[in-house]
Amino acid sequence: MDAMQRKNLRLVRRLILGCLLMFCFGFALVPLYDVFCKVTGLNGKVLNVGPVSIGGQDLARTIKVQLIAVNNEGMPWLFKAQTPQLEVHPGETRKTAYLAHNPTASRMVAQAIPSVAPSEAAQYLHKVNCFCFDQQPLEGFETREMPLLFVVDPELPSHIKTITLSYTLFDITPKSEQHTELIGDRSTTRRIWL
């Protein structure tokens, strides 16, 4: 084997090794990101969901909870918090709701994704019952009140006076079913939103 063949073989080995390393890194990226967010407290992910047992209310403190509603791009629903701002005592179970209206004539399905700011407060906000736990189907022109039951943990650091809970609403309507409809003398294909 001459020097040129050895160089080519070494290059091929390095390229294969590089591809394998990139694949492994891409595969491990999501778990690494989750660990990074957990360690640093970034991303404001709400991890505390479901039933909660908190010792009692801290009536000496009042926390301002801001509720924000955002539609993802292309989501036509009207979406808002019934009460945009609440004042709660840590340990107090609080019930509120968001309102959603489907202004289209078609049935649509949505999923709400929560985010908390400051991110340090995410671990102290416990959602006992939330519309974000399930997909939300709405018929055309239907309006629905979507409940939210939450508790702010009394262990919330004292320097946090305001928590912002934001929900982004995504359209997850299945778009796979097609329907053929006769319009005039031509046949066209139209989507039916299920």
Image (cartoon, rainbow, N blue to C red):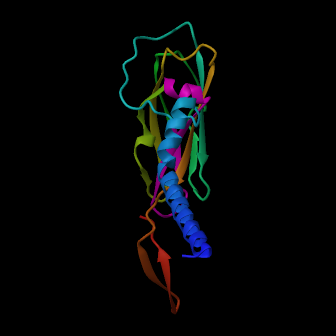
Tell which of 36 and 167 is nearer to you: 36
Residue 61, image x and y in percent? 57, 11
Q: Is residue 102 visible?
A: no
Q: Is residue 145 above or below residue 174?
A: above
Whether residue 118 is in magenta: the answer is: yes
On-image quarter of the C terminus: bottom left
Q: Is residue 89 visible?
A: yes
Q: Residue at x 59, y 34 (%)?
A: 42
Answer left or right for 154 relative to 51: right
On-image quarter of the N terminus: bottom right
Answer left or right for 193 relative to 168: left
- Work out which residue is located at the far front of the displayed protein and give it: 2
The segment highlighted magenta reads 98-124
Whether residue 167 is in magenta: the answer is: no
Residue 90, image x and y in percent? 51, 16
Residue 9, image x and y in percent? 54, 70
Q: Residue at x 48, y 64 (%)?
A: 106
Q: Is residue 10 above or below residue 70?
A: below
